[in-house]
Amino acid sequence: MQDEVSSGSGFFGRYFAGHPKGLPTLFTSELWERFCFYGARALLVFALTSQYEFSEAEAGKVYGVYTAFVYATAILGGWVADRVLGFRRSILVGGLIMAAGEFLLFVPSQQVFFYGLALIITGNGLFKPNISSIVGKLYAPGDKKRDQGFVIFYQGINLGAFIAPLICGWLGERIDFRVGFLAAGIGMLIGVFTFWRGLSKLEDVGLPPAGREGSASIIQVVIGAAALSGAVFFLLREDEAMLYVLSILFGTVMLILLAAAFRRGKVERDRLIGLLILLFANAFFWALFEQAGSSLNFFAKNWTDRVVFGWEVPASWFQSINAVAIVTLAPVFVWLWRWLDRKNMDPSIPIKFGMGIVPLGLGFGALLLGISLTGEGQKTHLIWITALYVLHTCGELCLSPVGLSAVTKLAPPSMAGMVMGAWFLSIAVGNFAAGQVAAMVGSGESGEGIATAQGYVDVYGPAMWASFGVGAFFLLIGPLVNKLLHGVR
């Protein structure tokens, strides 16, 4: 398949030169799917408080449950693609369900709004994990261009994450939140159409499993998606019930992995135990990092001086900083790891996890410094929240790509799916906890349901010290955990 490469002229063609013809299709489709998802993410808590009179604390809890479900359903979506629909049809069906969900957010009804969120969650579970899987399947085993292909693909993710808050956020804040969601839905339809038009470029990758080629499989999945979205619709407002669901799921998976570890040889046993330790660090990281779409979104709106040269920057635009920082800093981190490796100083996986958690505390510390330098009742300069996002992105670049790579290396071949599912579940747990943290910020509200500046100090202060403590702990135990990994780096 390596001779089937893109050969278009101009910048777009040169950018993909030497890669499979299907890569530009996947790049563009994923760009628009992320545009859809991050467009809704940037506006979600604002719409809940403005349109449906939720307090910031209530909106934070909903946001936490919503993002937790996004990662939890990815596990089910991968199973559906493997066993029922195949990757292609899972992506098409998932994309259409996501678009339908965005369009429902346009309807001025709270019940319809929440069912729209449930559809976005369900559709994302079918779309997101499976398009990434197709990227890997485009390349022959051992093809050195595979890593480069994923780098290009992830630039599409970041480009979509960058432009979504700028367009959907501006429409939502300046015109109407419903218009912002409508734009996100249109973007998703563009993504689905792009993927459908480019199916022929995927050759035989992503076809349905044998015996599942007919339309009956699609009907079964649509019925299942309707049932799942109904359950999600109920749990979106029931954070206590969601806590039980996640606790049972995560606890069960942890016990299964632990039991499997002690049934295997020493090397596989140790590696699984080491991975379990990393999963808890991963959940902690996302619990604080994911304040971005909830409490930090409110801080940008209510407590940040956003006026630049007489023009007020929309609060949702700060959601784009992470994507810009990733594109800018990712090459720096790649160079850094290579430089350290040449000097035999490349940090181990557990050390990199510790290095990823510490910047969380530095980011919160920067924002707290900005608050302390601001007069009582006044707004902080936008440089402080910008510094927070950049520092948090540095942490993400240390932990997230390293963690994904570690999962694929540490998992026994016969348990690869289960271990990847555990990784996604740890992110789901972190996102749920993020909603609870955001609710704690919102609990220090004024009479108008807006978190006070002191409310941020009361929560972000302990979050800062907890980040320093957990990060330092992993830096200290890193050599011990690394021994469990038996040479995996």
Image: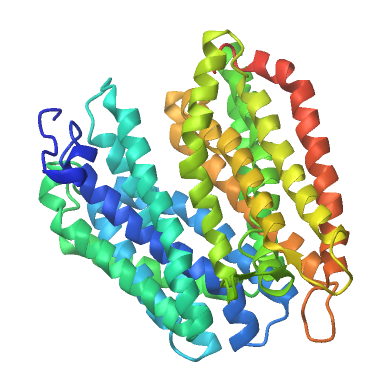
* Residue 324, x across and y down, in percent: 49, 50
Q: Residue at x 46, y 84 (%)?
A: 178
**Above or below, comparing residue 394 to residue 145 in the picture:** below
Q: Residue at x 79, y 73 (%)?
A: 451
Q: Nearer the viewer, residue 208 or 26?
A: 26
Q: Residue at x 49, y 79 (%)?
A: 172
The C terminus lies in quadrant: top right
* Residue 479, x across and y down, in percent: 72, 16
* Residue 52, x across and y down, in percent: 62, 87
Q: Give the tally of numbered discs.
A: 0
Colour mode of the rendering: rainbow
* Residue 208, x across and y down, in percent: 20, 49
Horizontal placement of 346 versus 201: left or right?
A: right
The answer to whether residue 265 is seen in the rendering is: no
Q: Residue furthest front?
A: 309
The answer to whether residue 52 is seen in the rendering is: yes
The N terminus lies in quadrant: top left
